[in-house]
Amino acid sequence: MSEKNREGKRTARERLADEREKQKKAEKRRRGLIVGASVLCVLGLAAVIGVIAANSGGDDESEASGPVVAPSGALGKDGLAIPVGKESAKATLTVWEDFRCPACKVFEQNYSPTIHELTESGQLKVEYHLVTLIDNGLGGTGSRNAANAAACAQDAGKFAAYHDVLFENQPPESDDAFADDGKLIELAGKVDGLDTPAFRACVEDGTHNSWVAKSHEAFQKGGFSGTPTVLYEGENINQDRSMTPEKFKRMVEEANKGQ
């Protein structure tokens, strides 16, 4: 074989190796977007912590000092968890979310069909905790107002459906559209039976605002680095780059074997 041919084959092998390496990196980036998207809502955590500290004597503190009205059926310490699914389910998922957080929307887009399937089949229960990370980082009240409205929906037994509607209609992160109670009430019209005088009064009065502030305080004390924070049986599955909806479903089904 001539030196020229050998060089041509070597170059071809190198090109193939380079292409395979590019594919591996692309796949890693894809998984990182789906599973590790929470980094997008950290908002430069050090900066956010500084903003939170600077605002510690502001509106959130005054709200937290008022009466804390937990939504109907809330569970856990201080009633900060909104449950979805059957109590008898053998697997538990804990989700910390901000309705203004784009990474939370990515998580919901990818995982909500699987979560719905597992909760409806009685295999999984989910405990939702609502936080105001984006409000604290970018300003505004959309995270808080949307969380309050979701708690009002829980009072009406419509949390899961309204939760999904809020993420499906999430504005751009820098657009504080959810600060408008009228917008939140308009979106309630997409959930059968939710737009009632009681729901409107709950939204407009900020009935659960202090509860939302308490929930965010618990998020801070938990030392979590961003949203969504997704814990399965206490383990942060956001940190598992191999996690997929299919893998998660197998884990839940395994936990329910023999039931």
Image (cartoon, rainbow, N blue to C red):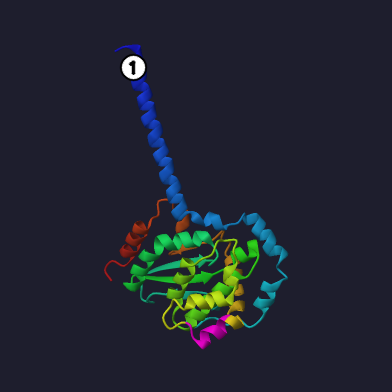
Q: Nearer the viewer, residue 224 or 145?
A: 145
Spot occupied by residue 29 in the image (x, y as percentages of width and height): 45, 46
Please tell me in which quadrant of the rendered image residue 218 appears: bottom right
Q: Decide whether residue 200 is among the magenta residues.
A: yes
Query: Which quarter of the figure has residue 2?
Result: top left
Q: Dot 1 lies on which element?
A: helix
Q: Mark 1 belongs to which amino acid?
A: Arg
Name, please, the residue furthest toward the top.
2
Q: Residue at x 66, y 56 (%)?
A: 47
Does the magenta stretch mainly form a helix, a strand or a loop? helix
Q: Residue furthest bottom?
A: 197
Q: Is residue 72 above or below residue 95?
A: below
Which portion, as a residue range, is magenta? 195-203
Residue 170 among those drawn in magenta? no
Q: Position of residue 190 (x, y in %)?
A: 44, 76
Q: Position of residue 164 (x, y in %)?
A: 44, 70
Residue drawn at (56%, 77%) of the image: 182
Front residue of this view, candidates 168 and 5: 168
Q: Is residue 192 left or right of residue 179?
A: left
Q: Position of residue 244 (x, y in %)?
A: 38, 55
Q: What residue is disc 1 on? A: 6
Which residue is rendered at x = 55% and y = 74% of the image? 183
Residue 176 vertical placement versus 197 (above, below) = above
Q: Is residue 163 visible?
A: yes
Number of numbered markers: 1
Asked if 165 appears above or below 35 in the picture, the reply is below
Does the image show residue 235?
no
